[in-house]
Amino acid sequence: MRGLMQDWPMLCHRIIDHAAMVHGEREVVTRSVEGPIHRTNYAEIRARSLKVAHRLDREGIKLGDRVATIAWNTWRHLEAWYGIMGIGAICHTVNPRLFPDQIAWIINHAEDRIVMTDLTFVPILEKIADKVPSVERYVVFTDKAHMPQTSLKNAVAYEDWIAEVDGNFKWKSFDENTAAAMCYTSGTTGDPKGVLYSHRSNVLHSMMANNGDALGATSKDTMLPVVPLFHANSWGIAFSAPAMGTKLVMPGAKLDGASVYELLSTEKVTFTAGVPTVWLMLLQHMEKEKLALPYLKVVICGGSAMPRSMIKAFVDMGIDVRHAWGMTEMSPLGTVGGLQGQYAHLTGDEKLDVLQTQGYPPFMVEMKITDDAGKDLPWDGKTFGRLKVRGPAVSGAYFRVDTPILDENGYFDTGDVATIDKHGYMRITDRSKDVIKSGGEWISSIDLENLAVGHPKVAEAAVIGVYHPKWDERPLLIVQLKQGESATREDILKYMDGKIAKWWMPDDVVFVDGIPHTATGKILKTALRDQFKSYSFPTAAA
Amino acid sequence: MRGLMQDWPMLCHRIIDHAAMVHGEREVVTRSVEGPIHRTNYAEIRARSLKVAHRLDREGIKLGDRVATIAWNTWRHLEAWYGIMGIGAICHTVNPRLFPDQIAWIINHAEDRIVMTDLTFVPILEKIADKVPSVERYVVFTDKAHMPQTSLKNAVAYEDWIAEVDGNFKWKSFDENTAAAMCYTSGTTGDPKGVLYSHRSNVLHSMMANNGDALGATSKDTMLPVVPLFHANSWGIAFSAPAMGTKLVMPGAKLDGASVYELLSTEKVTFTAGVPTVWLMLLQHMEKEKLALPYLKVVICGGSAMPRSMIKAFVDMGIDVRHAWGMTEMSPLGTVGGLQGQYAHLTGDEKLDVLQTQGYPPFMVEMKITDDAGKDLPWDGKTFGRLKVRGPAVSGAYFRVDTPILDENGYFDTGDVATIDKHGYMRITDRSKDVIKSGGEWISSIDLENLAVGHPKVAEAAVIGVYHPKWDERPLLIVQLKQGESATREDILKYMDGKIAKWWMPDDVVFVDGIPHTATGKILKTALRDQFKSYSFPTAAA
């Protein structure tokens, strides 16, 4: 028997409708790409989103067509999001930090019909314009006064373009499973893969984010998303903030410590979200200038692990730090690391221990860890296994890729290796392609690296698994020493001895002049595995 | 184009699964009907819910079958909810405060196959047992030691009944639009009407309730729902608390001031929810015994309007008061009255003015006010019109009633008359059947009653609309004076003069010995309209 409640499809534009009706005067403040601070509110943003929708409709953009944005966090970008999604077109956020060839590949794969962009990225787009034949028009997020001379096809200033319609327009109606947005993941191997969010998944994700233990901002809060709209959906903030009527502060193109501090301070921001690099720049600026942030209540940090010293710095200022973990494929929130009830009383190192985990999943994210055969492993905080996830805001497939990506129970393999404790707190221990499989047991390459780099003479350390006739794989520690330092294999191993289980000890240490990195600064383990493919352990004969 | 996110149906039992996995040790504390305080946790509740599901399945209960509960807020009742819903059966909560004949009517209309109940209600059920032929078995929420002698068909103690299975059972799978629960509204006219919640509507409602500006409890909070599970879904708390991992304190059968205070105090409750009568009893007890509640942070109050003095009493204790308005047909949350950003700085009377409204709708509740012709009216805080609502947790139809209940835009008419201000704050001014329609303009009978009752000699006042040849309807004020007092028509009107618009002034005042009431204490205006049906105004000839 079916329930008798209303059929009310979860559509993204209903969020901006709600914000305009109930929180219409709440501000959206932007450091504009042109320079000055710009102030608007949710009522105006909705009215202008309807102009975008109206103008796209006149342009002939239809349900399912892709419209790309390559842009900073600004009020215009937010308007474009709601306008594009509100006619059932797909808002494709492109990361401008990718190589131009990757950007061209992605635009071609998505077959974007329109590209909306900031002044900043016009030169990049001009370079690849002849490689992206699907693009019919470029809309530059600026006004006539700031519009540059450009060779981009049918280029128009956003303000001129939307001025061509009156915005007296109704959102289109469609099923909640209709695609709303698209974002490509850039793995270290293979082609980028397109994640295709639905209206349903975006709306559910925003509700998940708005519970008090996840992001949890309210209508009394001010949120500054340093994390860009092109980075995994801006962690959902473009939806969750208007759904709650939270005031938004958009940092535009300036993400350095001084610029972020200025906005946090002058706008009395209470919640902010970004990657560790941003917080490092902020903390350095604050320390140098002896500054405080008395209004800031919560810092959400994701993208990569937050160093303990950084967590402590915020905690010492009385700020609630929440470590978040997620993926583009998860919309992106997977876990958020607030303190659960049983930990609320903790202080000092015990508190930092909890805050340093990646956190626990909110309702609507299901997690499990399994061995290679898919068998569930216990949540004891020690055993580590492949981290798999399930939920309404988790990918079920990639755009135009036929290969199934879910296991027989519908779980998506994150590619991470993790432990989970009895309270659901998850700790990433490795990437599954990097974990060392020794005699059926797993050794975390990251834990070994973090330990080795603590040695005073070590500049950087990498650990890879190398073939071993008895154990299948054993850890090889690759060390780059600090300039002018010298050390032996034995020095390093002696330093590590006693700090880890005996069987985790690397079977050998090799010294190199430099360790290769990816474009985003991560250790390029594929290159190291290639470099050491003919290496064999001295212990291998034993 | 469809999005490519996972198909993850929103099913109620996924909430208790989440609670057991991530918040398994969080407590559920009950003042048991048998007397002692009982302590369990979400992991145990889930395990025992699975036993209920297993046992119901063995009993032959199938998808869509109705299982009634007539019971207080206890851990066993909560287990029964999840167990019933987890096999796709419909959990029908019956209000034990109804007249026995109404209870029988409702059980028959729902065709309940099993009734699960508390010791308290066995005598009532015995009285109507021969009138409810669909019921195959009665399960009493107790153990063998406390099981009474009873004539109820196939009666069994709950603990014995679930002990017959091991609970090694999987939840059933079904579509998220499947009916999960049922609750009858008891209007003052006509038969009770069955609201049929779906799994989808219950889950969405719980997420809506868990935003920081609605109920907003977290895993660090302890929630005491005084509002019963049989009263409009316990305002969703049976779902929202486990979804967040909020500790639950269940008051069982004792809702008097001393008993509620004792639980609030000993369990360090931070959030509580109930009707004004409960808070009146609590405040009286606290005043008499000179008690404090230092841990209590938030009081949610709904069911009927909270007097200003009561709001002030909690505010003066530093407690955040949130007025809530809703209906069984809304799952039930419609509006919640926290302070939005622009009001956060208010103090004193200005703050109380905001807190005395019914609040504003969270995302997923759409509201509008219209005139009788269905035309939208402005949100200016003054104009009042019929309050209509739309959303995924709002009724679209009643169980086995063919009459459509939505307007052409899918809105449900609440039967209330209200104003809405520009920030979405709603204030109920009347019931639409009671509002007085004078020359095309509306006059609030409630506002006139509240004013008249302020006269020192007036015990109670009622206002009804009476036919007027020129204005269609004009207000007639019906007054019951305090024992031993006397007053004239002119005394009363003079008191009201200047406090309301001239054209709101009642055309006449009549004095009566008693004003009729409904079973729940509301003024029975149908009886008054009947009593005064031949009345004609002295002004009518003019």
Image: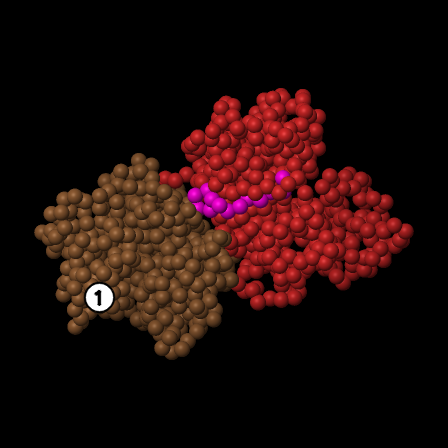
Chain colours: A brown, B red
Magenta stretch encompasses residue A402: no
What x and y, as percent, mark residue A250?
A: 39, 65
Q: Amino acid at mark 1?
A: Val
Kindly identify which chain the residue marked by label 1 belongs to: A
Magenta part of the chain: B20-32
Query: Looking at the picture, does residue B166 appear above or below residue A7?
Result: above
Residue drawn at (67%, 51%) of the image:
B261
Magenta stretch encompasses residue B25: yes
What x and y, as percent, mark residue B472?
A: 72, 47
- Is residue B314 shown left or right of residue A55? right
Label 1: few (<14), some (14–19) or many (≥20) C-alpha neighbours in 10 Å: some
Q: Is residue A79 visible?
A: no
Q: Nearer the viewer, residue A510 or B539?
A: A510
Q: Is residue B424 visible?
A: yes
Residue drawn at (30%, 62%) of the image:
A71
* Residue denoted by label 1: A458
Q: Nearer the viewer, residue B229 or B23?
A: B23
Residue drawn at (49%, 53%) of the image:
A341
Quadrant in the rendering for residue A399:
top left
Secondary structure of the residue carrying numbered label 1 = strand
